[in-house]
Amino acid sequence: MSTTCDTLVLGAGAAGLMCAAHAGPGTLIVDHAASPGEKIRISGGGRCNFTNLHTGPENFLSANPHFCKSALSRYTQWDFIDLMAQHGIAWHEKTLGQLFCDGKATQVVAMLVTELRRAGADLWLSTTLRDIRHDGSRFCAILEREGKTRQITARNLVLATGGKSIPKMGATGLAYDIARQFGHNVTETRPALVPLTFSEGPFAPLSGTALPVRATCNGTAFDEAALFTHRGLSGPAILQISSVWREGLPVTLDLDPGARLLDALRAQRRTEGRRNLTTELGHHLPARLVTYLTPRLDLTGNLADQSDARLVQITDALRAWHLRPTGTEGYRTAEVTLGGIATDGLSSKTLESKHLPGLYAIGEAVDVTGWLGGYNFQWAWSSGWAAGQAI
Ligand code: FDA
């Protein structure tokens, strides 16, 4: 069976659905999964952190930090918020500009599917790509659906199959393979927004302990919560810093990001000099962490026993805890893939290939990776919209 369409979109995730909703009639969007937008469904604990009020190019990592500017400025967080309003989907700001649905993330998936149907696009699920070629003027895809082989001819092909994170959810490197097949470079890919691991598992006794920190690596810092796990460190501050961490680099934790501890200890020493140092520290840090640090920092005696120099020494140590991760939890749990289809082969305005007219790449498959906090979905919406408009 053979079908001709204007545009074939591979991948019915965030970017592909958005693109199909704007590419219009004659668009066929296909996915090997049984449902569209599975990552949207599970994101944000089922409430989808769908954008961030403060989205700007500075919240993205890429070999070319300017690449994301055009799409982000032409389809902004406000445009997506408008779309949510048109569909009556209520939302709230949780923290740091992060917007979540009041209800379920599936509302966002339903909204995008409604939009693409309204635009006259067709959605095929449980569909496998067997082969893709370009005959000089058109793309020819061999698809398998419901046990039948179908040949699709399309003027445009949009790569929207995302990155490699969470293979159990159907993530594959398909977009990278096809991009390479058509002459594009793919930058090194690695798991990002991912917990960091330590070979000696020094934190097992702290597992479950969370506190606000400033995590710094390679000149970049994030002020958010860190969470100790059995194998290492997680929590927003660590997930953020994992995107800039590289093998061999230390990560420094400031356990007193507000820089208030030294003054507090001095004040308590004046009024409660007989209080145990560790008891006082337990008012500022989680008790289990104080117990863990006690032998390591030799935290003994009363507050009155501590000289000013000693208090400075202790607080300095707490403000610069150098840790050496040995790895990450990998693609199994990474929220995103860093790197991807090199931006130098794509138009930043339309996301179209500079080598092969009619070929587009959008979303996470491209070497544009957002911080934690709704930025990755905004990139999916903006890049999907930009390609859809251009088509
Ligand atoms: P996406 O991965 O969404 O879609 C790709 C589609 O292609 C999938 O439907 C997949 O089935 C399909 N596909 C893959 N290989 C295929 C093949 N070989 N054949 C056919 N189809 C194929 N971001 C954010 O901004 N806010 C948040 O709250 C979260 N939360 C979050 C939680 C978790 C657990 C994860 C894993 C990720 C997030 N993210 C996030 C990141 C966000 O989900 C991600 O950046 C976007 O979904 C990327 O959108 P894409 O459309 O590019 O890929």
Image (spheres, grey):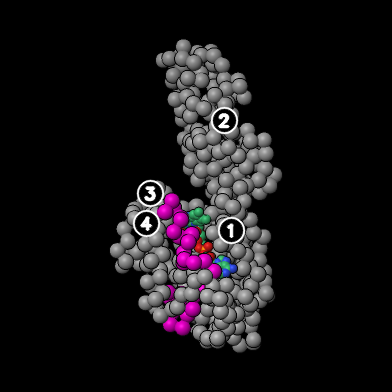
Question: Of the residues shown, which amino acid type is indicated by label 4?
Answer: Lys
Q: Report if residue 66 is visible in the image.
A: no
Numbered range of the magenta stretch: 20-46
Quick one: label 4 or label 2, which is nearer the N terminus? 4
Residue 196 vs 288, above or below: the answer is below
**Mark toward the viewer: 1 or 2:** 1
Mark 1 lies on residue: 167
Mark 2 lies on residue: 205
Classed neighbour count for the residue bearing mark 1: other residues with Cα under 10 Å, few (<14), some (14–19), many (≥20)? few
**How far is mark 3 from mark 4, CA to CA?**
15 Å
For the residue pair 250 and 9, the one nearer the viewer reads as 9
**SS for callout 2:** helix
Quick one: label 1 or label 2, which is nearer the N terminus? 1
Identity of the residue drawn at 47% across and 21% down: 280
Identity of the residue drawn at 44% across and 59% down: 41
**Mark toward the viewer: 3 or 1:** 1
Quick one: label 3 or label 1, which is nearer the N terminus? 3
Question: Of the residues shown, which amino acid type is indicated by label 1?
Answer: Pro
Picture quadrant of residue 347: bottom right
Classed neighbour count for the residue bearing mark 4: other residues with Cα under 10 Å, few (<14), some (14–19), many (≥20)? many
Quick one: label 3 or label 4, which is nearer the N terminus? 3
Residue 155 numbered mark, or none:
none
Question: Of the residues shown, which amino acid type is indicated by label 3?
Answer: Lys
User: Mark 3 touching mark 1, by CB under 8 A?
Assistant: no
Residue 191 vs 284, above or below: the answer is below
**How far is mark 3 from mark 1, CA to CA?**
29 Å
Tell me, yes or no, whether the highlighted magenta stretch contains residue 36. yes
Mark 3 lies on residue: 94
Residue 93 vs 140, above or below: the answer is above
Mark 4 lies on residue: 104
Question: Of the residues shown, which amino acid type is indicated by label 2?
Answer: Pro
